[in-house]
Image: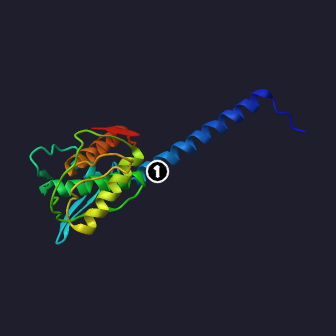
Amino acid sequence: MIEVSDRTILVIVAVMVILAGAAVALQLMDTCSTSGAGEEAIIKKTDDGYYLNLQAALELAEMDPRNGTVNYRGFNFTGPQRLYIFSRAVVMIGFNDTGMIHVRDYGGPEDPYGYLDTATLTESEYLDMAERTYTWMESHGRSPNHVGIYVKGSPDITPELAEKIFREVLLEYMRTGMLPEIISV
């Protein structure tokens, strides 16, 4: 019969803990690598708009949008296009989606309005808002007049504030590697 000392048991347990930790670390690395962040930025102009990957969307979020149109890698993106890109990118990250973002030429809102100058949203609120924004834009070819928060009694926000919210979410994601639980702008 084989005798196992207490020291041998401790060594075996330590090795098992190290192996389990390494497996968890590898799983986390695999999850991060499939999110699209950290890849080389890809952007292509086509007859029906632009195609860009998540890394290009993240780099675009870093650019100052004060003058209305942002020039990124020789391509000009309008406010409505950035609203679409940022809302789509937030949802891609939130649902660990990969692939390219197809951006068309979107018109501005027909009759923009909104009542909030600032907003504080939870992750589930801004993910819902982002998904509704980009799907509405795909269906209508323009920015919405306002973006609603699905919380009873919440006032609507302007498309500009929605773009700012989604941009801040992406910037926070770039800093931490995670979507923020709460975002305030």
Residue 41 seen in render: no
Residue furthest top as drawn: 7
Image side of residue 105 versus residue 165, left or right: left
Along the line of sight, the residue nearer the viewer: 23 or 67: 67
Residue occupying image coordinates x 34% and y 52%: 129
Residue occupying image coordinates x 61% and y 41%: 19
Residue under label 1, please give it: 31
Percent of width and height locating residue 106 = 18, 63
- Locate the C terminus by quadrant: top left
Image side of residue 173 versus residue 114, left or right: right
Percent of width and height locating residue 82 = 21, 54
The amino acid type found where label 1 is placed reads: Thr
Q: For residue 180, what is the image quadrant?
A: top left
Percent of width and height locating residue 151 = 39, 47
Number of marks drawn: 1
Q: Is residue 107 above or below residue 159?
A: below
Residue furthest left as drawn: 67
Percent of width and height locating residue 137 = 25, 63
Residue occupying image coordinates x 34% and y 49%: 149
Image side of residue 42 versus residue 29, left or right: left
Residue furthest right as drawn: 1
Along the line of sight, the residue nearer the viewer: 151 or 17: 151
Residue furthest front as drawn: 153
Q: Is residue 18 above or below residue 7?
A: below
Residue occupying image coordinates x 13% and y 50%: 70
Residue 115 seen in render: yes
